[in-house]
Amino acid sequence: MGFPEQKKALSLSCLLCLATGTAALLLWPVGGAEAQLSTADHLAEPGFWPTQINSTSAEFVGSQVCAECHSEIYALQVQTAMARTAAPVADSEVLKKISHLDFKTGQYNYGISRSGSESIYTVSGGGHSKSDSLIWAFGVGVVGQSYLFKRDDRWYEARATYFGSLDNLDFTPGRALSSPRDLDEAMARPVPVAEVMRCFTCHSTGVTTLETVDTSKLSLGVACEACHGPGGKHVEALREEKLTFGRFSGEVGKGLIFNPERLEPADSVDFCGACHSTWWDVKLSGGTGVPTVRSPAYRLENSKCWGSGDKRIVCIACHDPHHTLVREPQAYDAKCLACHASSADSKATATLPGHACPVSKSRCVTCHMPKVMVPALHYNFTDHNIRIVRAGESFPP
């Protein structure tokens, strides 16, 4: 990740750029909590961790098999944005519904046109034009959707990304060029195969190599085994128990599948941070200020109330990864009041350490987790740095 554009993209948390692979050399507690780690540190440890490269696809069973026992969870999870975060361009819902997208900057025009199941990316300027057929789409388009294509057996990242708030194209985050050398540079950035596959480690399930783009054995999107690890041994044990005893005990196979819910608070947040950037991933990338709002794990662990790492404010305490993201502010009030007193007369206790808010006890996140515009992504993200926001204060790093 040594190219200037790539380093810049890390600080902007661009749609395609994943957690940094740089290992942390110094590990100490952050904000009084047990030590957070970089994703690279976690991957160096034994056992399953998201974004790891698996030695074989043989132990992956696929979500349809998981659904045999977990049908309700499966039915909900496949509707989430995470489950649909990678797709062949032919299946892109964004490009299916919009026949033409375009934007102009400087002397160059950027456009994507749909023809049947094919989406053609064209850049023109200076009397010349080039076109390529897009192959992969990453993201569902609520925030954005970015694209990869191939030319002369090399992979390229389009400099144009679709943004949901614009309902149109603009520069891919971190890829804007004020003075491209030529049409080729204006159009795209060459991407090594290993980097393409790092995109798939967060946008799909079951990556087994960084050496080749072979998607025939992948499950596109974040499926069950992306977070729970390969399920082969777990399923085998359960099926054997059912065959032997005619029923499931609920205990057999527990130790043969990974359950993120059992992680300690710091590891739990880092677990989600494997794709959403851990505290150390952001620090090692040099990210600071407004762009880091795109990294909720980092922002959360900068919160004063993170303290020693309370299980009530880890990511999954508020967000169930099996469900579509809840966007109504009032839906989170009960989570806030699990730590904060609801009455000004109440005194802080060990189990209810947070004082009552003097302003309100409803729609708490609208004040204490404000929306912040990240210009490169044209989107207002919720700032997970939980705090009392004061007028005129500098933005917390």
Image (spheres, rainbow, N blue to C red):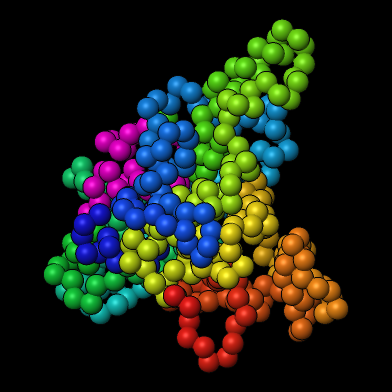
Q: Is residue 244 left or right of residue 147?
A: right
Q: Is residue 208 above or below residue 15?
A: above
Residue 327 position, x and y percent, is 67, 65
Quadrant of the frame with the C terminus: bottom left
Quadrant of the frame with the N terminus: bottom left
Residue 286 position, x and y percent, is 33, 67
Task: Please report the residue visible at 48 percent of the width from the left and 35 percent of the height from the top.
Answer: 48
Q: Is residue 52 left or right of residue 231?
A: left
Q: Is residue 130 visible?
A: no
Q: Residue furthest left?
A: 181
Let me know if residue 133 is in the magenta part: no
Let me know if residue 212 is in the magenta part: yes
Q: Residue furthest top?
A: 244
Closest to the observer, 363 or 265 = 265
Q: Residue furthest bottom?
A: 392
Q: How many marks?
A: 0
Residue 167 position, x and y percent, is 49, 69
Closest to the observer, 240 or 217 = 240
Q: Is residue 121 above or below residue 44?
A: below
Closest to the observer, 337 or 144 = 337
Q: Is residue 354 visible?
A: yes
Task: Please report the residue visible at 62 percent of the width from the left and 49 percent of the height from the top.
Answer: 321
Residue 190 position, x and y percent, is 22, 54
Q: Is residue 193 left or right of residue 302?
A: left
Task: Please report the residue visible at 65 percent of the width from the left and 54 percent of the height from the top.
Answer: 311
Image quadrant assignment for residue 300: bottom right
Q: Is residue 106 left or right of residue 71?
A: left
Q: Which residues are magenta?
A: 190-214
